[in-house]
Image (cartoon, rainbow, N blue to C red):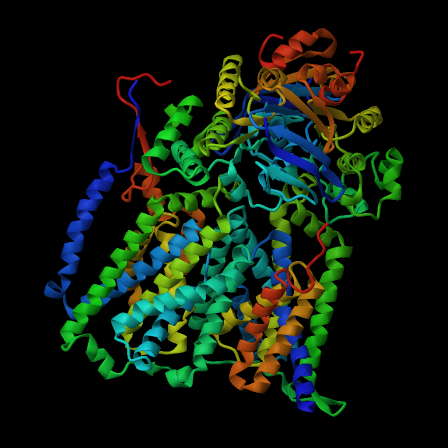
């Protein structure tokens, strides 16, 4: 029995990581209706940037965040303004296919730069440290990851609904033309949104890299997890995204408990069940 | 006054038809003039051409942008193995049967993922493909995660000699490309094809003119899934070995296909043909450069999408008003007659 | 005469904006009805509700005796309702001929040469025959409006809904348009026409409905309706003393 | 003769293949109130989109204080002191009343208008400031739209169909508020279908027909018949 409870708790904590994968997707979809197929590969890019930073400077991956987060934000701003802004419009094909092409480029560039060998970020003692709660040993790293996820989502929520920047995001999302009339340059606003999304992605990538080994080919899988969390939670709802991540995480750990080969499959099946039963997700944003 | 005449064929299309027929005869005779390696390459070209035509019908005409067609390629491949090994069927029976099974399976899948719109639909199809991959990896009898080979007895049942088998699998690939291009062409020429084109241009006006959009898209999805599975069967009949990662590879069966269609010209029948030729030209030229080739391919696709979204064929057509496959209608007024 | 279309207690709102407020009216088979009202009064929304592009919050719509409230737009077209869009929605990548052919083959269910001949007829009567091979995306606004009507007619409707097709026409074009609509009407098609160009409307319709804020505020014989000071003020924005 | 505040020279505008404006010439002096009238589809809204930068034109076709602005983006135009009250109000549904107004002040231009003075002009907005903008009535939404444009302290304000879809009594009250807005030295362009309302507050009028200027003059100099002819393209 305790094993099952343990699986659920581990799943909840894992859900924090998935929510971090999803938050960036959710943010850019919310602001500019863009679905970034390269999102997963950008998570992996962040992990590799973390790897380079830690090996070159000999610092802890958490310290590497000080470099990787601004670097990813910068990359986000540049690809949004230099590339992705040109794809936005009523036609869904250009953004889809351009980000798909970006995904292939990123994957192969990482392969070229870092080879296909699995890599890992070394988190030191934090990786193995655990605290005992009610007879269960909870890893400090998963707990920390979950805590960071909650903090990031609370931060995004606050930014979105209580700051001038968030007001700009919502205005551009509502009506690009009218927002432009108010003096907002939408190209810049979109660039900022992507920068913010990739800053979150940087955190996700570093935490992923400490938790498990990674190689250039696994981006697609991370995109799917993030996407599933977004849809399960309901489009456009950040806290829903966290809930979606948790549900996905729990489904996976329970699946793995039944048979190790079923971990990821169980997550996909949970997603398809939610899609069948509640096509708008469990916590859809109330439309105005 | 005498009535205007409605025609469809153009001079270019008649010429293209003649050239196409001649090319087909030459290609069909390849076992007598081409080498073994060339025939393998040409088979691969025909199979990719088939996949590209199918994906183009789905994405370019029905607006169903899927990045999960590898689900059906792999399914068709696995059905070939399962039905011949377990069911004792002849491969040439197993492959079309795999198509039928794919069609049946695609209906419940469609009812689920049609709830997702646009790019979310795309990722939803990918999830489905992953479910397929992980599920087949669980089937121990088919080799689980490491896959299995087609038994020698089954291979030999195709033809006794090696050259006979190679000719047969070449003709199957060529034949399937011809059948699929022909079927897509005839479909687009029919009133249903006209309806599909109308949906692409304006869904709201299409439904107001009596077109059931959901049903039309479902039909396209089911038919392309079935054909894609048949092609999958043929692909793995050539490879003789299958594994979940190879069968459900997003790069091999979807990324390349998308690049082909985008570069050639999405939403045109000619596009996939030109795209396939360009793709293989690029691949054979850059084959020695490894991953660089994929980098270049990705970059080319992005540039085409941004600078010439209608692809190479779109550029040609805009410039010369050409149509090799006569889909459009032309109304010709009698020469010495005044317009109303 | 029998009732072709019956609208009962139709209601629809988007948030605080009401586009249909307990609207009820009947249309006899073979009638020609005009709908007037200021911009934003809910006229186009009414068409969207009748054709199935919008579903109502409450109320019932029946057509030729059958309840069609929950029928899809496509089903309604096949039953004989077709419309022109106020903001033209051409199939931009297709030619004018092909646009109309969609209506003939899908809506009217015609095939082959029968469909082609019908489309040529419709294009001829709407003056679009010289443009038959032009891609719809290249047409001018006026031609697009004409195409809207041609496409609707190609579906062989029993009930034709026209949404502001006369705006911006020259005098001669307007006369030709009126002739076309009169002929369609005389061939037995029931017509509901939303139009700002009042003199064109009055040349065709036998009955007027005036709506404002989604509510039917007047209905009856055109002359009497146009004379009523209430309609003058609300619709034309003319002060009674001006 | 001094340079006009805004001048249009042979302005054309296109949507794809479709041309909506043909060689429109116009000059607006500082402090004037201009009415632009015309039937549906005459090109009024296109004209507003061109001036405000939502449609791109050749640079020299639109000049503002002598500067060629035809090719500027809408946000750049907004920073120069041009504001548009768009047709159909178009508030941001995700933003509260107050947030809508604050966004209007995004350009950071200073002048008489602030959250406080806008709320003084339309006291109901003070009460409703925390509400979702979509929960307001049409007339109140129009007040927010006007207030939002004023928040940028514009030198030139464009009103596109302010009476559209509003009850007569609301239209009346909005027109009553106009002098209070324009009186602050602001130049205004009023686009209307409701001719008599537009003429009652303006000094000069331009009539558009099928994308061309069909009539222009001082309000007191032109007759109703002239307007009817210019409006419909036929003698009444």
Q: Is residue B238 visible?
A: no
Q: Is residue D17 visible?
A: yes
Q: Residue furthest front?
A: C1
Q: Which of the 4 image quadrants contains residue D35?
A: top right
Please state which of residues B334 and C111 is positioned toward the viewer in this rendering. C111
Rendering coords of residue D162 (x, y %): 73, 29
At 48% from the left and 66% from the top, the residue drawn is: B126
The C terminus of chain B lies in which quarter of the figure?
top left
B41 vs B244: above or below: above
C34 vs A272: above or below: above
Q: Residue furthest left?
A: B32
The N terminus of chain B lies in which quarter of the figure?
top left
Q: Number of labelled discs? A: 0
Rendering coords of residue C114 (x, y %): 35, 33
Rendering coords of residue C36 (x, y %): 67, 24
Q: Is residue A99 left or right of residue D87?
A: left
At 39% from the left and 37% from the top, the residue drawn is: C110
């Amino acid at each position: 029995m305790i094993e099952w409870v343990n699986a659920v708790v581990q799943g909840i904590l894992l859900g924090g990581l998935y929510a971090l994968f999803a938050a960036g997707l959710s943010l850019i979809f919310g602001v500019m209706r863009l679905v970034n197929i390269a999102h997963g590969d950008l998570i992996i890019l962040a992990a590799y940037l973390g790897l380079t930073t830690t090996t070159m400077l000999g610092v802890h991956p958490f310290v590497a965040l000080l470099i990787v987060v601004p670097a990813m934000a910068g990359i986000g701003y540049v690809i949004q303004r230099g590339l992705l802004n040109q794809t936005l419009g009523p036609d869904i094909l250009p953004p889809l296919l351009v980000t798909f092409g970006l995904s292939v480029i990123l994957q192969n560039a990482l392969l070229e730069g870092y080879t296909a060998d699995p890599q890992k970020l070394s988190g030191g003692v934090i990786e193995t440290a655990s605290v005992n709660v009610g007879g269960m040993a909870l890893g400090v790293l998963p707990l920390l990851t979950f805590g960071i996820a909650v903090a990031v989502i609370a931060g995004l929520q606050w930014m979105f609904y209580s700051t001038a920047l968030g007001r700009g995001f919502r205005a551009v999302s509502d009506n690009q033309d009218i927002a432009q009339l108010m003096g907002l340059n939408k190209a810049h606003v979109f660039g900022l949104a992507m920068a913010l999304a990739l800053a979150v992605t940087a955190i996700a990538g570093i935490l992923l890299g400490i938790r498990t080994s990674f190689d250039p080919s696994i981006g697609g899988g991370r995109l799917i997890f993030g996407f599933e969390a977004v849809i399960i939670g309901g489009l456009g709802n950040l806290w829903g995204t966290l809930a979606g991540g948790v549900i996905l995480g729990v489904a996976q750990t329970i699946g793995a408990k039944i048979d190790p080969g079923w971990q990821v499959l169980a997550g996909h099946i949970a997603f398809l069940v939610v899609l069948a039963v509640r096509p708008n997700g469990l916590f859809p944003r109330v439309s105005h | 006054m005498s009535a205007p005449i409605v025609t469809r064929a153009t001079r270019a299309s008649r010429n293209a038809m003649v050239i196409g027929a001649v090319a087909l005869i030459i290609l069909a005779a390849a076992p007598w003039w081409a080498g073994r390696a060339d025939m393998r390459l040409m088979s691969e070209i025909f199979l990719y051409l088939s996949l590209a035509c199918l994906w183009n019908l789905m994405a370019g005409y029905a607006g169903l942008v899927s990045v999960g067609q590898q689900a059906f390629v792999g399914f068709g491949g696995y059905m070939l193995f399962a039905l011949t090994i377990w069911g004792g069927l002849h491969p040439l029976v197993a492959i079309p049967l795999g198509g039928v099974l794919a069609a049946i399976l695609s209906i419940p899948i469609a009812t689920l993922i049609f709830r997702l719109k646009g790019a979310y639909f795309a990722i939803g199809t990918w999830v489905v493909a992953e479910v397929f991959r992980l599920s087949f990896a669980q089937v121990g009898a088919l080799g689980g995660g490491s896959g299995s080979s087609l038994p020698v007895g089954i291979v030999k049942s195709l033809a006794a000699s090696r050259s006979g088998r190679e000719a047969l699998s070449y003709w199957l690939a060529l034949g399937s490309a011809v059948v699929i291009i022909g079927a897509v062409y005839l479909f687009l020429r029919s009133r249903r094809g006209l309806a599909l084109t109308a949906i692409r241009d304006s869904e709201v006006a299409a439904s107001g003119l009596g077109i059931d959009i959901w049903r039309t898209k479902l039909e396209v999805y089911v038919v392309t899934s079935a054909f894609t599975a048949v092609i999958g069967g043929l692909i793995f009949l050539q490879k003789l070995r299958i594994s979940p990662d190879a069968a459900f590879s997003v790069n091999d069966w979807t990324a390349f296909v998308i690049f082909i269609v985008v570069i050639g010209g999405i939403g045109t029948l000619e596009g996939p043909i030109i795209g396939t030729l360009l793709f293989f030209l690029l691949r054979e030229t850059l084959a020695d450069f490894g991953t660089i080739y994929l980098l270049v391919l990705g970059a080319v696709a992005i540039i085409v999408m941004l600078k010439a979204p209608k692809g190479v064929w779109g550029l040609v057509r805009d410039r010369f008003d050409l149509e090799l496959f006569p889909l459009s209608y032309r109304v010709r007024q009698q020469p010495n007659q005044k317009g109303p | 005469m029998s009732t072709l279309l019956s609208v009962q207690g139709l209601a629809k709102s988007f948030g605080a904006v009401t586009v249909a407020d307990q609207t009820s009216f009947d249309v006899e088979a073979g009638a020609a009805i005009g709908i007037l009202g200021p911009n934003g009064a809910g006229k186009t929304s009414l068409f969207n509700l009748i054709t199935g592009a919008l579903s109502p919050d409450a109320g019932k719509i029946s057509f030729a005796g059958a309840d069609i409230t929950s029928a899809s737009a496509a089903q309604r077209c096949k039953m004989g309702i077709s419309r022109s869009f106020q903001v033209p929605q051409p199939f931009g990548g297709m030619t004018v001929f092909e646009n109309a052919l969609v209506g003939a083959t899908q809506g009217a269910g015609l095939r082959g040469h029968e469909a082609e001949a019908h489309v040529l007829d419709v294009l001829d009567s709407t003056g679009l025959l010289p443009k038959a091979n032009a891609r719809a995306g290249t047409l001018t606004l006026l031609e697009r409006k004409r195409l809207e009507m041609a496409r609707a007619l190609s579906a062989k409707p029993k009930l034709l809904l026209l949404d502001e097709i006369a705006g911006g026409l020259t005098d001669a074009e307007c006369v030709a348009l009126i002739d076309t609509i009169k002929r369609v009407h005389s061939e037995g098609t029931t017509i509901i026409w939303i139009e700002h160009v009042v003199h064109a409307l009055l040349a065709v319709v036998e009955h007027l409905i005036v709506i404002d804020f989604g509510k039917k505020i007047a209905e009856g014989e055109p002359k009497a309706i146009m004379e009523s000071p209430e309609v003058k003020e609300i619709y034309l924005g003319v002060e009674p003393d001006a | 003769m001094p340079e006009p505040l805004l001048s249009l020279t042979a302005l054309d505008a296109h949507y794809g293949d479709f041309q909506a404006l043909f060689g429109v010439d116009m000059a607006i002096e500082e402090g004037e109130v201009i009415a632009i009238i015309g039937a549906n589809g005459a090109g009024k809204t296109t004209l507003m989109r061109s001036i405000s930068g939502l449609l791109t034109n050749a640079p020299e076709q639109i000049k503002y204080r002598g500067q060629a602005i035809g090719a500027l983006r809408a946000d750049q135009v907004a920073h120069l002191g041009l504001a548009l009250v768009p047709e159909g109000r178009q508030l941001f549904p995700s933003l509260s009343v107050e947030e809508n107004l604050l966004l209007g002040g995004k350009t950071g231009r200073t002048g008489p208008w602030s959250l406080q003075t806008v709320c003084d002009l339309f006291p109901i907005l003070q009460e409703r400031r925390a509400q979702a903008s979509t929960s307001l009535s049409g007339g109140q939404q129009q007040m927010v739209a006007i207030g939002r444009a004023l928040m940028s302290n514009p030198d030139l304000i464009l009103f596109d169909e302010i009476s559209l879809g509003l009850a007569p009594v609301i239209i009346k009250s909005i027109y009553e508020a106009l002098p209070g807005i324009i009186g602050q030295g602001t130049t205004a362009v009023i686009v209307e279908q409701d001719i008599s309302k537009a003429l009652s507050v303006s000094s000069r009028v331009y009539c558009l027909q099928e994308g061309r200027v069909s009539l222009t003059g001082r309000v007191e100099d032109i007759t109703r018949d002239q307007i009817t002819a210019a409006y419909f393209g036929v003698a009444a």
